[in-house]
Amino acid sequence: MRPARVLVLAGLLLAACRNEPAAPVKFRAPADGRLTEEQVRTYLAEAPKSAEYKWVAARVHEARTAGLTRGMDRKIADSRRRILSSLEERRRTLKDPAKQAKLDRQIAEVRRLLRGAPSEVPPAVRENAELLARMEKARMEKEKP
C-alpha cells in the first residue's frame, strides 16, 4: 500500500473512532409518580442537578411533607376525639339547659371538625414516603459506629 493511502485510511479510521459525546438522554418522569431505589440512592448521594434529580427531589420533598402532615393530622384527630369525649362527659353532668345548649354547640363543632378529615394521600406519594423512610433508616444504621 502506498504511504499516502495509509495516511488517508488512518485519518478516516481516526475520524470514525473519534469519541463524540452522545446526545444526553432526556429524563421522563414515570406516569405513576413512583420513585425507584436507585433514584432515591442517587438523590441521597447528592447527585448533580439534572432533570431527573430535580424530579426526584420534588418527589422526595412531597413524600417528606406527606409523612409530616400525616403525623400531625393523626395527632390533631386524636386530640379532637379526646376533647369530644371530655365535652360529652361534661354534658351528661350538667343540669342547666343554657349550659347544655352551649356544650351541644361545642360538641357539634368538634364532630364537624372530625368529619372534615384531611384528604387521603395519593398511593404513589404514600409509597414514596415509605421507601424514603426505609432507605433513610438503613443509611442511618449504616453510618452508626
Image (tube, grey):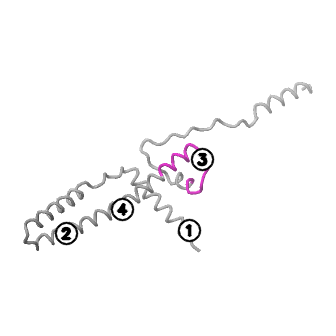
Kindly identify the amino acid type of the residue bearing the numbered disc 3. Lys
Contact, mark 3 vs mark 1 (Cβ under 8 Å): no
Q: Earlier in the sequence, mark 3 or mark 1?
A: 3
Q: In the image, which disc is placed on residue 49?
A: 3
Q: Residue 97 lies in what quarter of the image? A: bottom left
Kindly identify the amino acid type of the residue bearing the numbered disc 4. Met
**Which callout, 1 or 4, points to the residue nearer the camera?**
4
Provide the residue designation for mark 1.
142
Q: Which of marks 2 and 3 is nearer the N terminus?
A: 3
**Which callout, 3 or 4, points to the residue nearer the camera?**
4
Whole-angstrom CA distance, mark 3 to mark 1, is 26 Å
Residue 76 sits above or below residue 20 on the image = below
Residue 137 sits above or below residue 113 on the image = below
**Which residue occupies 13% across, 69% down?**
91
Q: In the image, which disc is placed on residue 110?
A: none
Whole-angstrom CA distance, mark 4 to mark 2, is 20 Å
Pick whichever, 144 or 110, lies toward us: 110
Whole-angstrom CA distance, mark 2 to mark 1, is 45 Å
Quadrant in which the N terminus is drawn: top right
Provide the residue designation for mark 2.
85
Q: Residues within 10 Å of mark 2 (few under 14, many from 20)?
A: few
**Which callout, 2 or 3, points to the residue nearer the camera?**
2
Query: Mark 2: which secondary structure?
Result: helix
Whole-angstrom CA distance, mark 1 to mark 4, is 29 Å
